[in-house]
Amino acid sequence: MGGEVLAMSSLKEKRRGRRGDVRSKMDHRRRIPFGLDQVEIPRLIEQCTYIRTADLIADTLALVPFLPNDVSEVIGIARSGMIPASLLATHLHLPLYSLDLKGGVTHCGHGSRLDGTELQTGKRRRGKVLLVDDTIASSRSMTRAMEVLRDERRGSRVRRAVVYSTKKHAEKAHLVAGLLPTPHWLEWNFSNCGLAKWMAFDLDGVIHGHGGRPMFLPRRTPLAAIVTARLEGSKQEGRKRTEEWLARWGVQYNTLIMGPWETTEEREKRGIVAVWKGEVYKSLRDIELFVESEPGLAYAIARISGKHTLCPRTGEVFEP
């Protein structure tokens, strides 16, 4: 996922070029009948795409008919590689292991369905090892994982499967479900990727969910800013209570920008919130992505600021 750090300036020019590059990969795609449908990999994905966890699941399962029939164990690269690895291990009825890039492979355990198999007696079948990760963008993780396996599975035949890869590093895996150019955003890690320091988040509907439940929690790298239409002096949701809630859930951020209005009536004037958020986003010169909960506001914010805006609720990325 190191490819996420691609600078987002002059995105339009980069987007035009990368679309052509991705389409050139069509000559290397694989197609196979699967049930009533034709399954084809790798799926070609547009630049500046938001990938949902549901997409990850569907694209992981698209790999199944292409896997060798003599796989004896599935090893996921922790952490996010364990999502597709657990799906594949379950579908293939195989033991699941977790690989730590710092060293070591750990058996993840199993339920009753694997009782009585060779796994239970400690004897692995002598088949191929399937090494799985969610993405390849720099190949560092996959290279390191192979080094670990040389110690942990000496002499084993390893097949590498990745759900998403950039075109540049696709050859690092035997199977790739989707070609995903940078920049892109992944639902399961976008709030804790290296790009967070260049992002601004809405609060309600993004970080703070209904009834005070947490949603996307930036905990790794401080967000550049949280921009919320909450009123500074509100007794129910003013600065003090908002900061207390963020601290309770370990949210990391550099600045909290709250609405400038005195009353809720003033704030509710038609279009005023979109204009305010758009202008704030525009003024934050180092910020390259705004994450907004409402699609209508996200569209307006992108147009006003002249910068990209993501709406996780609908999975849309709005361009200027």
Image: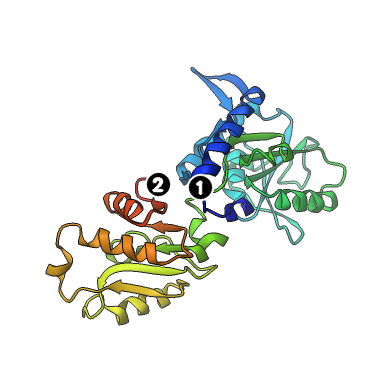
Work out which residue is located at the far right of the displayed protein and give it: 155
Label whose residue precedes the other's in the sequence (1 or 2): 1
Secondary structure category for the residue under label 2: loop
Q: Is residue 264 left or right of residue 25?
A: left
Q: Amino acid at mark 1?
A: Leu
* Quadrant of the image occupied by residue 160: top right
Residue 143 sits above or below residue 60 on the image: below
Residue under the point 42% across and 69% down: 225
Residue under the point 35% across and 67% down: 227
Residue 220 sits above or below residue 104 on the image: below
Mark 1 surroundings within 10 Å by alpha-carbon count, few (fewer than 14), some (14 through 19), many (20 or more)? some
Mark 2 surroundings within 10 Å by alpha-carbon count, few (fewer than 14), some (14 through 19), many (20 or more)? some
Q: Amino acid at mark 2?
A: Glu
Q: How is the image coloured?
A: rainbow
Rendered image: mark on residue 11: 1
Rendered image: mark on residue 225: none
- The image position of residue 67, as x and y in percent, is 67, 30
Question: Which residue is at the front of the view, 312 or 184?
Answer: 184
Question: Which residue is at the front of the view, 48 or 178?
Answer: 48
Look at mark 2 in the image and give the residue it sits on: 319
Residue under the point 79% across and 53% down: 148
Tell me if I can see residue 7 in this picture: yes
Query: Pointers 1 and 2 in contact (CB under 8 A)?
Result: yes
Secondary structure category for the residue under label 1: helix
